[in-house]
Structure formats: structure tokens, C-alpha cells
Image (spheres, grey):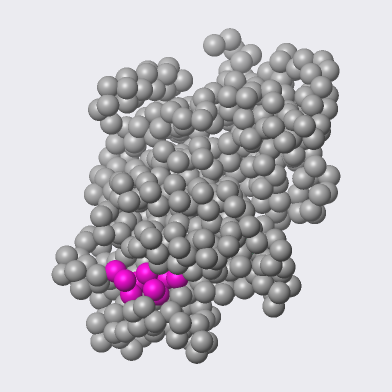
Amino acid sequence: MASSSSAGAPNAKPIQVKLVLLGEAAVGKSSLVLRFVNNEFQENKEPTIGAAFLTQRCKLEDKIIKFEIWDTAGQERFHSLAPMYYRNAQAAIVAYDVTKAASLEKAMNWVEELKRQANRDMVIALVGNKLDLVSASHGGDEAVRKVPVAQARAYADEHGLLFFEASAKTGDNVLEVFTDIAGKIPLDHLLAHPHRGAGGRGGAGGAGAGAGNRVDLLRDGAPRADNASCAC
Amino acid sequence: MPPSRRRLKKLVHKGVPHAMRAAAWFRLAGAHDRLEEGRYAALAAEAADPATAAANPFFDIIERDLHRCFPNHVLFCTPGGEGQQALREVLRAYALFNPTVGYCQGLGMVAGTLLMLLERERAFWVLVCLLETPCKGLYDPDLLQLKTDAIVFDRLLAKKLPRLARHFCANDVSALMFITQWFLTIFTTSLPWPSALRVWDMLLVDGPKAIFRIGLAVLMIGKRHLIKACPTNAEILPWILHVPTEHLQPDAVVFVALGIELRASDIVKMRLSASKAQLAGLV
Ligand SMILES: Nc1nc2c(ncn2[C@@H]2O[C@H](COP(=O)(O)OP(=O)(O)OP(=O)(O)O)[C@@H](O)[C@H]2O)c(=O)[nH]1
Ligand SMILES: [Mg+2]
């Protein structure tokens, strides 16, 4: 098992982190995962029906994290299935689309539901996706932005969430979302209480990010998801 | 069952010749009798009215799905092309025709499949028939039927594939995690295309039991691999949600499915019992 996971890590036993993606339909949840897992982007990603499941490993300091990702369907109709996916999850990415104001409201509803019903020490990241559409450097236009950064950040701060604006299309900030989440999860606790089945197929880690150093990661152009290839 | 019906079923199980599929599906679905002259044109006209578009909550979700539905198919790959326009019209017309269901993700794939074979009006009426008969309730806002069917599927699995059922149970894998995708797209996103078409053939003559049998057949085919090579849910789930196509060629899947003993009346009984358990809060 897991041969490639020995990528220079002394502590080779991967730590499993269950992560769930929530957010309105078409904000780009599947695209964020696809970028993280395969470093790919598809212009016309098929809608997710029910939920998709993917895994990806990444390296954090000397540990190997194995993300088990539930990518859920965004349509309101599938809402009642969500608890099945966020139950037992240690982390959540709640995504919205920076060009759609209503999608932030939907994201806020998810955050509140998670605070009420999910794991009490769940690490939650609020992610505004499709940043490329509002960045001139990517041919976007700030005028199409419907969610001001300040508003989303203030909400995230108030609720103790990690916060990012990202683009699944260009890959901006995507890896950072996942590494920062990994950095905030009490991994030693998980290591002490490993849950079922740590085995599985390998995939070498991405950027070796320390906890909470997202700014550094952004600036030093740490290896992007190119080397976060996955064999899963 | 009259002998002629039995003969028909046998023929359809062998696969409707593709050249005849459009006509056969229209007939078998009962669309021939269900079609109301002029109704579709009226719905399409209403759907094209900007005021309707602004007021209908489903139109926006439909719009976001149009370019994401079979994006690699010639008919649908061009933005604003004939395929996407047809899909928009049929889905909007359906949302107006049946405001309870409106639009549910998955229906794009169902309508898209029909539009590959039939022109808009005929596709629309087959869609109506599908949702009134073999797929009744599956797309309702509460997804209650789907949840009931997940219980039924879990119970069938325990009966037909007990070892696999125990393996799933030990790994917290339950049917609702995969039948949502399988059932709501009627296998169009899970099986190789020729196999999916055969599933639809079966569904139209056998009713809902066809989708249960196909689902069980997929797991039967994958059983060895799932038990031997998939020790945890991290291996089981990706396999079930992206079944490797080489094992699922049409004749193989249909052959295994038809070998599973399951009567339409079994499904009726099991659904009843599952929904009672559900209402009583037992599951
Ligand atoms: N410009 C741009 N488009 C994006 C980005 N991320 C996703 N998209 C597009 O937005 C559409 C929806 O993306 P998905 O990833 O399928 O969205 P989703 O949230 O998974 O949607 P559901 O599965 O329906 O809930 C697709 O056409 C993507 O190509 C992004 O960062 N920038
Ligand atoms: Mg998706």
C-alpha cells in the first residue's frame, strides 16, 4: 500500500481528514476539488448529483494528510442529504461565487447550519470562488464583482472561519485553502485517535506549508498543485 | 401477462435497435396517448416570455445547468447552439407543466438523453410520462421517494449480496450515497453510453424494478473487487461513483440484471414497508 506516500516524510502514516464542500449550485465546488486533486479545470463541469467523493494527499510539515472529500450537490433540493456528508467531518469548505450576491447568503446559511449541527471543532473555510472573473490580470472586470471582499471577510472573522478568495480556473489560492485547513486541524489529536482504515493508494504531497502561513505561500509561489498529483 | 406483452419484453431486453429507439421509447413510455395537442407549443411560448422567466425560480437553475449537460456531445457542446436551446425550452416547459417538481438537477441529463433521439415536443411528452410512471416522485422537492428507495436498495443488497452489504455497513457506506447519482440521472452519468440506453429500454418495459436490478447488477459485477481490493470507504466510494466502464458493457450488465430475481410487486411491497419505517422514524 501507499508507496508514494513515503515522499520524504518521516511520519508516513497518513492522517485522514474528512472534508465536505457545501455551497450554492454552480459556484464551483467541484471545480475547486478538481483543481486541488488533479490540477485541472473544466469549463463545463457537469452538475454534481447527490455528491462526489475524492481523495487527495498533501504534506504538512512532517505529516501526510489524506483528505477524504465529499463534494456535495448545490441545488436546494439536495439540502436534506447534506448531514449525511458533514456528519463526522473535521473540515468544511463553504463556497460562494464572488459575482453572485445570493450565493454568499446561501453560504452564510450553511455556516450557521454547520455551527448548529456539525462537529463542534470543525474547521470551516469560507471561499469566494471565480476570483479570475473580477481580476483584471486574468481578463476579468472588477465591475462584475457582487460580493465585496470586506463584507465576506468581516463575516468570516466574526464567525471564526478561514477566509479566501480563490479561482478554480486559474488555481489561485486553491492549494492554500486546503493547506491552511490542514494547518488548523488538531492533527495530533487525530493521530492519537486514528479512525478506521488509514490505508489506501498514494499520491505525493503538494506544498509543504506550515500552519497558518497562507501569506507566505501566496508570495513565495510555493509549488502549485502541479506536484500535488494524485493516484486516487 | 398476455403472451404478446411477454414477447415484447423479451425483445426489448435484447436491446431496441438504435434506429427504432426514438419511436419505441415514445410508444413504450405511453407518450403517444399522453400527448396533448398544442400543449407543448403553449408551454414553450409561455417559457419564452421574459416575465415568466423572471418570475420562475427554476429558470435560473436550469440556465446554470445548460452548458454543463453533456458538454462533450456534439448536440450540446456549442454555447447557445440548437441542443442547448432545445434543452432550455424543454426543461422550462416542464417546470411550468409540473410546478411541484419544477427542475431538479439530474433532469437535465434525462431531458438531454431524450433530445438526442427525439424532437422537442416528443421528448417533452416522454419526459412527462417518465416522471408520471416509472420515475414517479423521484425528483420531488423533499426527495422522499429517493430516500425510501435508498432504504429499499439497502435491504435488497442485504438480501442479494449479504457479504458486500456487511462490507458497506462496516465502512459506513449506504445506498443513498450512490443511488442519488445513479437513479436521478437514470444511469446516464454512471454507465457507458450503450449500457445506459439499454437501461432505459428496460425501464420503459419493466418499470422501477429495472433501475433496482441494474444497480444491484453493477454491484454484483464489482463485488469481488469491492470486497478484495477496497478495504475502506476511501476505495469503495470512488469505485461506486465512477464505476470502471470496462466491466459494464451492455450485454454483461443487462444479463446480470435480468438474472436477479425481483418482481414489480416486491418493489411495491418493499417501498411501502420502507416508507412506513421512515414515517415511524425508525430509519
Ligand atoms: N471563471 C470561472 N469559472 C468557474 C470557476 N470555477 C468554476 N467555474 C465554472 O462554473 C461552473 C460551475 O462549476 P462547478 O464546479 O460545476 O460548480 P458546483 O458548485 O460544483 O455546482 P453543483 O455541482 O451544481 O453544485 C462551471 O461551468 C465551471 O467551469 C472559476 O474559478 N472561474
Ligand atoms: Mg459540483
Q: Position of residue B281 (x, y in %)?
A: 27, 26
Nearer to the camera, A162 or B27: A162
Residue closest to the far left: A192
Residue A181: in magenta span: yes
Residue at x-position 46% and y-position 30%: B142
Residue at (39%, 82%) from the top-left corner? A213
Where does the image place residue A227, in percent across and percent down from the top left?
49, 82
Compared across the picture, whether A72 is left or right of B226 comes to right
Residue B62 appears in the rendering = yes
| A171 versus B55 height, above or below | below
Magenta stretch: dominant secondary structure: helix
Q: Is residue B166 above or below residue A230?
A: above
Locate residue B283: give its quadrant.
top left
Q: Nearer the viewer, residue B89 or B215?
A: B89
Q: Residue at x 69, y 26 (%)?
A: B96
Place of residue A190 in the rendered image (x, y in percent of width and height, measured from the top left) = 22, 67
Q: Which residues are magenta?
A: A177-185
- Quarter of the image with the N terminus of chain B is top right
A115 and B121: which is toward the camera: A115
In percent of width and height, residue A76 lies at 51, 40
